[in-house]
Amino acid sequence: MANIPMEHGLLLAGVLFSIGLTGLLVRRNIIFMLLSIEVMLNAAGLAFVVAGSRWGAPDGQVMFMFILAMAAAEVAVGLALVLQMYQKYKTLDVDSASKMRG
Amino acid sequence: MYSLLWLVPTIPLVSFFLLMLVGARLPKKTIAAFGAGSVGISALLALVISFTFMTSPPPQHAYTQVLWTWIGVGNFSPDIAFHLDALSVVMMLVVTVVGFLIHLYSIEFMREEEGYSRFFAYMNLFVSMMLVLVLGSNLVLLYLGWEGVGLCSYLLIGFWYKDPANGRAARKAFVVTRVGDAAMALGLFLLFTQLGTLNIQAILEKASLQWATGSTYATAAAALLLGGAVGKSAQLPLQTWLPDAMAGPSPVSALIHAATMVTAGVYLIARTNILFTLAPPVQLLVAVVGAATLLISGFSALTQRDIKRVLAYSTISQIGYMFLALGVGAYTAAIFHFMTHAFFKALLFLGAGAIIMSMHHEHDMFKMGGLKDKMPVTFWTFLAGSAALAAVPLISAGFYSKDMILWYAWSSKSGGAVLWLVALIGAFITGLYTFRMVFITFWGETKGHIDKLPGKTIKIPLIVLGALAIIGGFVDMPHTLGHFAPFSEFLHSALPEVNAFELGLGTEVLFQLIAAAAALGGIYLAYQLYLKKAIHSREVSRGAVRGAVYRFFFSGWGFDWLYDWIFVKPFLWIARVNKGDVVDAIYTGIAAVSRGLHNLVRRSQDGKVRVYAAGIALGAIITIAIAVFL
């Protein structure tokens, strides 16, 4: 593990984050948007782990545990919202839920 | 006895509140008892107080009752205080006694009307306010009464509010008098800033110490007070409201628009006489205004068909005489004429009201006729009142007071031949229009049907006032008739004596004969025109020129038309042009700009989550870019 340079890890994390963000912006299906957010969260977690191993500190892995817990909570709330939305609009297209426009 | 003075205006006020609060639920008899009774008690009190005043006068012939400090701000602290001197004794007596008789008359006159309690409530409030006006010891309290009677005048002219024309007449009266009241308020401000007090006696003392005769401040103050007096007393140029004020019930015309309120201006000038003495140009103006008004409205009265309008114009004309007297410095003559005028003009209005009531609300004299035998009490009392109005020599009250004014118009040092001549022509016209009215109404063939004759409570006030219209003048005989003048002597404790040339008895007799001849000449001409029909009255107004003159007089010398063109039409034009309100455009503009901005910004809030996410991402990228590259 130690022989993988930090730049590579961070680059992977950046690529993953960009993929997630792109998915979030281009997808209209709310499930896929949640998945994309998941990818972005993991990219952030990867960046923490890589940085932690570079400095030999455990803090990075601790932060990753936090992110995992937060992601689980986010999914729980997100899926509940998805169910509500589906019941109301009979679709998973987020653009249809735009009643709160100004 | 004097300590009861405060009760005189308070009793009618209490009755007003009572009638206003519970009047609608009371039976008519109770309402009448409260309405007329309260004024009756106050008249009795006034009589007792006046009797005490005459038999054992207080020191300096004046008594002031301070009740409490009304407002206390810095050095401005007007009291609620009543001042009793010879002038206010006369005013108080006339207001309460004539007021009571008119209330008595109203009990029967208004019985069939809706709003019986409302009527009496307003009348009581009026009497109370009028008493505050004449008794108030400072100008602020006087102004309270002044505006109070103006309010009652408005309420009672528009008493039959269901007819929009009555509401218009009421508004006209209110607005036109307000013009004068504004001038008067300015006068009060000026007096306070210059003299530091509004107590009337203190003002009169300080004014003669601080101001020289003819100084700017004295002239301005007197002119502004004259403005108020002119508005209230319906003198030129603010006289147009009074003929229209006849829209109110007849007792209202008798009480407010003949006997009391319209003479408030005369009282104000007499009360502040020193200010006018200090301003000779304004005093001359008072005389000129009076002379012009008495002539102009006299001619207008000649042509009217509505009996109440004849009386209205004659009221304006008679108040013109009072102003003339004030202008030449004959204050006692003005107050004397005020008193006799209150008697005979109230009588004439009440008589006219009785006729109108009996003739199904018919106001047109030419549709009456021949009432001489049908309504004898009304006829004889009306005749007594008319004789007083026309100043029939020796036997009428009006003769003594008007003769005094005519005499001083000539002999006073501030009088003159022109003023006297105008007054003399006025006396001739008065005789003419008064007996034109009498002959048309009471002689000739009967044209209308009489269904209801006036009852006792209408007849009693008529008879009492009829008696007063005859004997009321005997309290002040001219020099030529034995020089029995207790009235003038009584008033001289409060008012200065007239500054007149000594012309001798012979001259005075001559002038009295001329005045008597003028009045009788007018009556004789009326007799020829309207009773004997030697010249047919229609002939007088035939032809283009004479018809135009007739219409000119009929419309009150076109003052309504003039004011309509000068004030009302331009005002309405501005109102129409400015319907959208030019100034308001600024504020609607601000609103429009913010609404546009709102529409612009609103676009960014499209409710699409992905766009928001993109926004967040973009913001994050920009932030990072700034952090990294800068």
Image: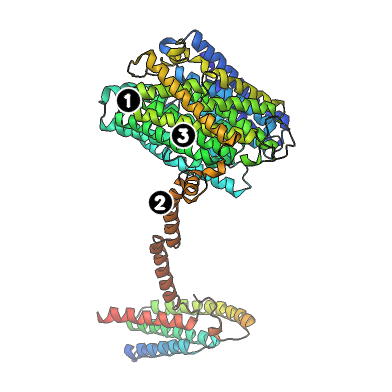
Circles 1 and 3 on the same subunit: yes
Alpha carbons under labels 1 and 3: distance apart: 22 Å
Above or below B610: residue B575: above
Considering the numbered disc 1 on the image, is that residue within a helix, a strand or a loop?
Answer: loop
Label 2, secondary structure: give it. helix
B286 sits left or right of B5 in the view: left
Residue at 35%, 21% (x, y): give it. B411
Q: Amino acid at mark 2?
A: Ile
Q: Is residue B477 visible?
A: yes
Amino acid type, residue under disc 1 in the picture: Ser
Instruction: State the residue in front, B151 or A73.
Output: B151
Please tell me whether mark 3 sits on a helix, a strand or a loop. loop
Q: Is residue B48 above or below residue B115?
A: above
Measured as percent of width and height from the top left, residue A50 is found at: 37, 85
Q: Residue B534's spot in the image, x, y percent? A: 57, 36
Residue B18 in picture, x, y percent from top left: 64, 31
Please name the amino acid that badge 3 sits on: Ser
| Residue identified by numbered label 3 | B233
Pinpoint the chain carrying mark 3: B
- Which mark, residue B414? 1
The quarter of the displayed image where residue B158 is located: top right
Q: Which residue is mark 2?
A: B566
For the residue pair B207 and B548, the one nearer the viewer reads as B548
Q: Nearer the viewer, residue A91 or B510?
A: B510
Q: Nearer the viewer, mark 1 or mark 3?
A: 1
Outermost residue, right side:
B451
Whichever of callouts 1 and 2 sits on the residue coming sooner in the sequence is 1
Q: Is residue B420 above or below residue A77?
A: above
